[in-house]
Image (cartoon, rainbow, N blue to C red):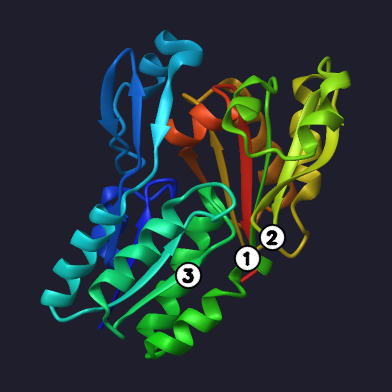
Amino acid sequence: MIAIVTDSTAPITQKEAEQYGICVVPHSYMTNGIAYLENYTDKNENYTRRLLAAGTSASTGQSTAAAFATAFRQLLTQGYEVLCIVISSRLSGAWSSAVTAAREIGSAKIAVVDSHATAGALYFQIRMARELADSGCPLNELADHCKSFDNIAKVAFSVENMGALRRSRRLGFINQSVNTILNRRPVFCLEGGSIVSKNLARGRGERVRMLSALVPKNAKRLMVQGFGNAPIESSLMRMLQRQFPEVEILHRELGPVLSIHIGAQALAVSWCLD
């Protein structure tokens, strides 16, 4: 039996974690001198109020090696093999923490995979991994399959301004290219685990249109994410429902950690081709 371990940027509900055998290792965040653990996507009560009150002083901490090691040991003790699939190593140190924990334990029953994703794309990768594991796929083969999932499950997002992304220091050369056109709202994708600039939108309506246009016509699963159920999320949901009338579209919060890094007014869409 294979259990799946991930980090809390994957928008998994508590019910889904229990249903699919998923252990979520939390990141942390701090507002106004108080530290909190990020929780299941439906259990992060009051985070929007906290982040708005904290402004630019809010900060985050990655999932630790000790936390991953605790999760791994508990699952091994219960007789599970462990597949750990986490946020892109180019966006967070969680993958390094998980690898450190696995090496410390030294068990062949643990496999750690860099998803090259986060948010809904990471969620869809986890769901695909669960389906393969339930079909009887051995751990080593499952880990190999997961390494190609970032070609199937992707995420695009747009931000209201560049302040949070600059502070996150995950932009690389993009920072310079967007500096002179801050009157527009940039649209990004994750490609190969890194943030890549795709376009610039004039106004919120164009943000919605550009994000929906990035979703391939053969998408089988979709997720919209935002901050605090802002009206623009509903606009994107409606547009996607018109484009993909046969596809179930999930609606989830971005959560505190991603919101701190990309901004409280961010809007994201994730899709999966499988």
Q: Point out residue 29 in the picture as x, y percentages from the top left corner.
A: 36, 30
Which residue is depicted at the point 67% across and 35% down?
Answer: 236
Mark 2 and mark 1 in contact? Answer it, CB < 8 Å: yes
Q: Which residue reaches farthest left?
A: 77
The residue carrying mark 2 is 192
The alpha-carbon separation of the residues under discs 3 and 1 comes to 11 Å
Q: Earlier in the sequence, mark 3 or mark 1?
A: 3
Q: Which residue reaches farthest top?
A: 53
Quadrant location, the N terminus: bottom left
Foreground pick, 32 / 199: 32
Which residue is depicted at the point 48% across and 12% down?
Answer: 55
Q: Point out residue 253 in the picture as x, y percentages from the top left corner.
A: 46, 35
Q: Earlier in the sequence, mark 3 or mark 2?
A: 3
Image side of residue 206 versus residue 29, left or right: right
Q: Point out residue 229 in the picture as x, y percentages from the top left corner.
A: 49, 26
Foreground pick, 135 / 84: 84
Question: Compared to 195, does 199 lie above or below?
Answer: above
Question: Compared to 208, does 217 lie above or below?
Answer: below
Question: Compared to 102, does 209 lie above or below?
Answer: above
The alpha-carbon separation of the residues under discs 2 and 1 comes to 7 Å
Callout 2: 10 Å neighbours few (<14), some, many (20+)?
A: some
Q: Which mark is residue 150?
A: 1
Q: Is residue 201 visible?
A: yes
Q: Which mark is residue 161?
A: none
Q: Point out residue 191 in the picture as x, y percentages from the top left corner.
A: 72, 56
The residue carrying mark 3 is 113
Q: Quadrant of residue 83?
A: bottom left
Circle 1 SS class: helix
